[in-house]
Amino acid sequence: MVGDVHLFNAATEGLVTVADKTIPEEISNGNIVVGASHGWLSFKDRHDHSVYVTDFYNSLAFKTNATMVPMPTFTALHHCQTEVVWNVAMSTSPGQQEEEDDWVVGIKFLGNQLSFCRPRRDLRWTNVSAPFKIFNNSNLMFSKRDKTFKLPAPVGNYLCSWDIQFHKDEYPAPKLHKLLFHNLPQLPLSMWELLDSCPREDHWVESPSGESFLVKWYSRVSLSPSLSTLPIVMVFREEDRKDGIIKMCYTEDIGDICIFLSKSEAFCVPASSCPGLKPNSIYVADRVFSVYDLTTKTFHHFKYPIDAPEKISRVPCWLPPVSV
């Protein structure tokens, strides 16, 4: 099957279109996007629930045939499920040959189960159960600095990490770090209580320079019954780590950095690396695509591109932007 591929460019607020691209059967039959990492998307088959990782939407692969990497069949832990995937994280891009053998895929399911796999070494998953009961608002990520997968705990008071240097027959236990927050924004108690009652996602993310941030994304906050809901974003920077405790400081200044949040693994890029990106901002892909300016505390919602087809399937995942 041959078709056009349309990608939204956050820097130009327009479409990047690749015409007459061969679409693999695993994608064209209406399978579900369950996550993205390093520019590679993960698709799940609607019928047999098999998962593929592909660079089909990666702009660097537009001039070549798409790579499709099949994942092993999922197995569920007791009292867990593997039908609904929450997000996907990877240690690196499968295309980086020097790290091909150590390429690790991590999947967080809705609920308590996490599964890890080295597709180039062993075609089966290592399944673990998260140490807390409710992880549905936390997103799995991979830390290049620590070589571990990380997951914020419920309420965001702890950070769990799993070492990727585990053996296939082992069940790696997580390390727990307590998060201490200071320099919190000055909000009335009623506002904190309101935020605690609102849907929220926690994203741990690292900048290219190795800085770590915890982003709390409140997707739907209703300040009044007569007003529509609005999103609120808070960013905390890691200041110090010692004896299992990580000190986090609220900040409204992340400099030249842009943070991208969606159903893909969260990531950072310098705004100066891609003309048109807004520094000190959070790009969000949810029901709508928008950018949050930390300086002015305002959201700018992207408009539907004028040159876009009338019907286009929307995938709530950011891919790393490139200068065009």
Image (tube, helix red, strand yellow):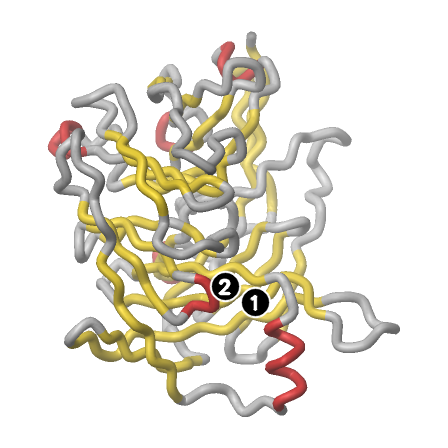
Q: Residue 61, image x and y in percent? A: 37, 26
Image point 50% across, 73% down: which residue? 234
- Residue 175 lies, with reference to residue 6, above or below; the image says below
Whether label 1 touches label 2, CB < 8 Å: yes
Looking at the image, the residue that sits furthest to the right is 226
Which structural element holds mark 1?
A: strand
Q: Is residue 85 left or right of residue 178?
A: right
Which structural element holds mark 2?
A: strand
Q: Is residue 52 left or right of residue 104?
A: right
Which three-letter amino acid code belongs to the residue tagged 2?
A: Ile
- Residue 230 lies, with reference to residue 60, above or below; the image says below
Image point 44% across, 32% down: which residue? 41
Quarter of the rendering occupied by the C terminus = top left
Q: Quarter-wise, where is residue 103 in the image?
A: top left
Q: Which residue is mark 1?
A: 292
Using a 10 Å C-alpha cutoff, classify the residue at mark 2 as few (fewer than 14 neighbours), some (14 to 19) or many (20 or more).
many
Q: Residue 97, image x and y in percent? A: 16, 28
Q: Nearer the viewer, residue 89 or 270?
A: 89
Q: Quarter-wise, where is residue 156 in the image?
A: bottom left
Quarter of the rendering occupied by the N terminus = top right
Image point 35% across, 18% down: which residue? 70
Q: Is residue 5 visible?
A: yes
Which mark identifies residue 282?
2
Looking at the image, the residue that sits furthest to the top is 1
Q: Residue 112, image x and y in percent? A: 43, 46
Using a 10 Å C-alpha cutoff, classify the residue at mark 1 as few (fewer than 14 neighbours), some (14 to 19) or many (20 or more).
many
Distance from disc 1 to disc 2, alpha carbons, whole Å, reads 5 Å
Q: Nearer the viewer, residue 148 or 272?
A: 148
Which three-letter amino acid code belongs to the residue tagged 1?
A: Tyr
